[in-house]
Every structure is written in C-alpha cells, then in structure tokens.
Image: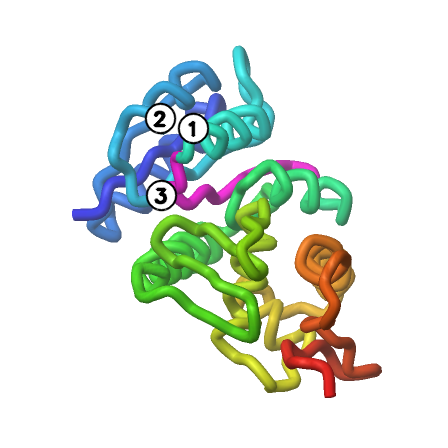
C-alpha cells in the first residue's frame, strides 16, 4: 500500500483529503503544522507528500526547499489559494512537482496524485543520453559534457520529457499534458517561462544549442544542423 503524507493545518480540509485517499486504498498520515510536516517528510518513507503552502511554524515553500537540500526526492503536490503565474512558478521553483489551487474537487486531486505516482515509477530506469547531455532518472542528476547542471524538480521533469522525445516537435499542449498534467491553454505561459529557465542552464555556455523554438507550434530538442 502506498503511503501519502498530508500536511494541512485546516482540519476539515485535511480530513476530507485523508478520507478520500483512504477510500482509494492509500495509507495516509496527517501533519497539521509545518515543523511536524517537515520532520515526518524528512524521516518517513512516503510515496507522495500533499503540502499546503500557508502553514503555521514553517511554510510549505520552505519545507520543500529544505527537503530538496537534504536530497529527499519524494514527489510533492502543493496546495494553495494563490493561483497567479508568479505564485505557481514560485511553488515549482521551490522544488514541488505539481500545484493545485484551492478550492478543488477531490477527483482533480486524485488525478494529480496518481499522475505523480505513475511518473515517479517511470523515472526508475537507465541513464538517458542525447548529444552531450546525460540524465540519471534514479538520482535526478543531469550533466552537459562533464559538468553537472543544477535543476529544479520541474526543470528536471521538462528536460526529461524532451530527452525521452528527441527530434520531435512538442507542442505547448503536449508539454502541459505530460509534464504538468494540465490541459488548458492559459497554462502555456508557464511552459515558456520554464523552457527559458532550462535554456539558460543547458544551452547558454554551450557551443551547440539543443533546445529550439518552432515558431507558432512549440519546441524541439535537436542538435543544430
């Protein structure tokens, strides 16, 4: 049975999530403040953490940053009442894997949970290579030539999707559906933001650029002609 940690200070919301996930045959633990949530997440063996942003004692963004600094790679689904592009980017940049705005339907939460768990299972595999890029799905490390590149969780997921689909034009919709599990057009601005982040880290100091824009369509990972 997969074990999920829910860190949510609103007890009614926490109870609603816990009951729903338990009905879906998950084992669920709950923490009601940030310090307790961080300790549980850092010490426990969870398949996923569902984490509110606004928490007493320690906020959700700080929790994720500290977990990632300790090399705790457990997938994190962040919950928040804020849903601007800037808020979403801040949450993802902290190291969370996905983002769900309140209020939400349980069916949407469950879909996000299952998608993150499925992706986590798929990431366990052999090293992926393209040109002079190397990506290790087990440790989440990335290298260009022999230089290790520090990526956030979402930058890593985006690069992995590119590297699993090289030399193919990927539309913004395709990227949104596969990397973020979103299907609405308004999310594409965030995709452009993250592709730019990734370019700065992957291509800026390299002789050959690998991430290319296909104007009006999307992006492609390919070696320059």
> Which sits earlier in the primary sequence, circle 3 or circle 1?
3
Please tell me whether mark 2 or mark 3 is closer to you in this view: 2
Q: Kindly report the distance in space between the C-alpha atoms of the residues bearing marks 2 and 3.
A: 12 Å
Q: Which range of residues does the magenta coloring cover?
A: 72-82
Please tell me whether mark 3 or mark 1 is closer to you in this view: 1
Look at mark 1 in the image and give the residue it sits on.
70
Q: Position of residue 135 (x, y in %)?
A: 46, 61
Residue sticking out furthest to the left: 1
Q: Residue at x 68, y 57 (%)?
A: 198
Look at mark 2 in the image and give the residue it sits on.
42
Q: Residue at x 35, y 26 (%)?
A: 42
Q: Residue at x 33, y 23 (%)?
A: 40
Checking the image for residue 48, the label placed there is: 3
In this orientation, which residue lies closer to the viewer: 183 or 46?
A: 46
- Confirm or deny contact between disc 1 and disc 2 (CB under 8 A): yes
Q: Is residue 41 left or right of residue 89?
A: left
Q: Is residue 17 left or right of residue 26?
A: right
**Dot 2 crowding, Cα within 10 Å, few <14, some 14–19, many 20+:** some
**Dot 1 crowding, Cα within 10 Å, few <14, some 14–19, many 20+:** few
């Amino acid at each position: 049975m997969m074990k999920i940690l829910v860190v949510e200070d609103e007890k009614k919301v926490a109870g609603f999530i816990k009951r729903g996930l338990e009905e879906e045959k998950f084992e669920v633990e709950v923490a009601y403040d940030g310090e307790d949530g961080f300790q549980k997440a850092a010490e426990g063996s969870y398949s996923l953490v569902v984490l509110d942003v606004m928490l007493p004692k320690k906020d959700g963004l700080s929790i994720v940053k500290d977990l990632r600094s300790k090399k705790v790679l457990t997938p994190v689904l962040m919950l928040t009442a804020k849903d601007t592009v800037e808020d979403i980017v801040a949450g993802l940049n902290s190291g969370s894997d996905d983002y769900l705005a309140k209020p939400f339907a349980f069916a949407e939460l469950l879909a996000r949970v299952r998608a993150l768990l499925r992706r986590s299972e798929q990431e366990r595999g052999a090293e992926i290579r393209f040109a002079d890029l190397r990506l290790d799905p087990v440790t989440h490390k990335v290298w260009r030539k022999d230089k290790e590149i520090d990526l956030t969780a979402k930058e890593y997921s985006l690069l992995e999707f590119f590297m699993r689909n090289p030399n193919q034009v990927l539309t913004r919709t395709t990227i949104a559906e596969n990397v973020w599990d979103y299907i609405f057009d308004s999310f594409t601005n965030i995709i452009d933001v993250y592709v730019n982040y990734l370019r700065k880290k992957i291509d800026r100091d390299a002789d050959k650029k690998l991430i290319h824009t296909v104007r009006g369509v999307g992006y492609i990972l390919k070696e320059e002609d």
